[in-house]
Image (tube, rainbow, N blue to C red):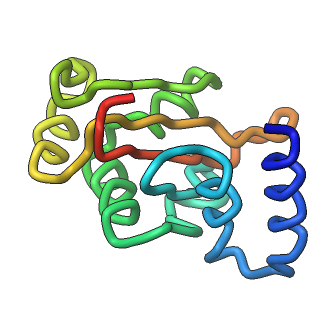
Amino acid sequence: MADKFSDAVDSLAALGGRESELWRPVLDVIPVEGAAISTIAEFLGAETVAASGPLAARLDELQFDLGEGPCWDAMREERPVLEPDIRSRPNRDWPAFSRAISEHDVGAIFAFPLVFGPLKLGAMDLYSESPR
C-alpha cells in the first residue's frame, strides 16, 4: 500500500494544475469505480471540480439538486460518510437521493470532507457498483 500511496502522490504532483483529473490518483489507489470532487463552501458555491465519468458527475449533480446526500453530511459533520450497501439499506436521511440513485448502478457510496483548518471547502465522493 505504501508504494500505491507514493504513486498517488506522484500522480497528483504530475497533474500540474489539471483539476479536472484530480480523481485519477484516487482511483489508482482505492478499489472503487468512480470519484467526484466538489466544492460546497459558501464562498466557492456548489460545483463539481472533477469527475471520473458521467455517473460520478450525475451522483454529484443529484446531491446538489436535491440538497441531500453523503457529501452534504460529510461537510456538515466534518467526518467521512460511509454507505457500504446503499441498495439493501437506503439511507433514511436521504429519501430523495436514495430513490434517485436506485436507477443507477451504485452499490456503495462514500464521502469525505475536504477541510483545510477552519475552511470547509468541499467533498470527495466515491462510488462502487457493488456493495463494499
Direction from residue 116 to residue 86 in the image, left or right: left
Near-viewer residue (54 or 33): 33
118 relative to 51, above or below: above
Displayed quadrant of residue 132:
top left
In which image quadrant can residue 27 be found? bottom right
Total numbered labels placed on residues in the image: 0
Residue 87 image position (x, y, % from top left): 18, 30
The residue shown at (60%, 44%) is 30
Can you give x and y, in whole percent of width and height, for residue 54 in the image? 34, 71
Q: Position of residue 77 (x, y in %)?
A: 57, 21
Vertical placement of residue 128 versus 52, above or below: above
Query: Considering the image in quadrants, where does the N terminus appear?
Result: top right
At which x and y percent is residue 32? 47, 47
Q: Is residue 85 above or below residue 38?
A: above
Q: Residue at x 15, y 38 (%)?
A: 96
Which quadrant of the figure has residue 85?
Answer: top left
Nearer-the-camera pick, 76 or 110: 110
Q: Residue, x 47% and y 39% (percent of image)?
A: 71
Judged left or right of residue 86, residue 25 is right
Q: Is residue 42 left or right of residue 120?
A: left
